[in-house]
Amino acid sequence: RYMDMDDYGRLVSMGVRLQLNLPSLSGFYGTTAMEKAQRLLEAGMYSCWGSDCHRGAGIRNMYLERKLKKRVLEMVRNAGRDLPI
């Protein structure tokens, strides 16, 4: 079975760190993955992020809703590294 938000919440409460794969937010891996990534991001469950972009330009070119882009930028800044998006 697929995990639901309560499952992720339990993992996070146990100290498990969740990583956001940035292309998930743009629908690169399909609608289901995009919607789940958005919900987890909005719930503040991610502690780190990664990408398949290998450079900032790939992130900058992704289409993200304004609200999600704001959350992604917040995560990037909290990591101590600003990318020009």
Image (cartoon, rainbow, N blue to C red):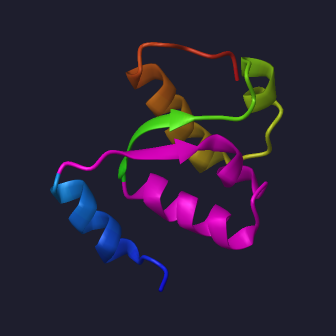
**On the image, which quarter does residue 23 sit in?**
top right
Residue 28 shown in magenta: yes
Residue at image coords 54%, 30%: 73
Q: Which residues are magenta?
A: 15-43
Q: Is residue 84 above or below residue 20?
A: above
User: Along the horizontal axis of the image, is 19 left or right of 7?
Assistant: right
**On the image, which quarter does residue 13 sit in?**
bottom left
User: Along the horizontal axis of the image, is 30 left or right of 20?
Assistant: right
**On the image, which quarter does residue 58 sit in?**
top right
User: Along the horizontal axis of the image, is 20 left or right of 29?
Assistant: left
Q: Nearer the viewer, residue 41 or 20?
A: 20
Quadrant (top left/top right/bottom left/bottom right) for the C terminus: top right
Q: Position of residue 61 (x, y in %)?
A: 83, 32
Residue at image coords 16%, 56%: 14
Q: Is residue 71 above or below residue 12?
A: above
Q: Is residue 20 above or below residue 40?
A: above
Residue 19 shown in magenta: yes
Question: Which residue sits furthest right?
Answer: 61
Question: Which residue sits furthest bottom?
Answer: 1
Q: Position of residue 69 (x, y in %)?
A: 62, 40
Residue at image coords 55%, 14%: 82
Q: Nearer the viewer, residue 29 or 67?
A: 29
Residue at image coords 66%, 52%: 25
Number of marks = 0
Question: Which residue sits furthest front?
Answer: 1
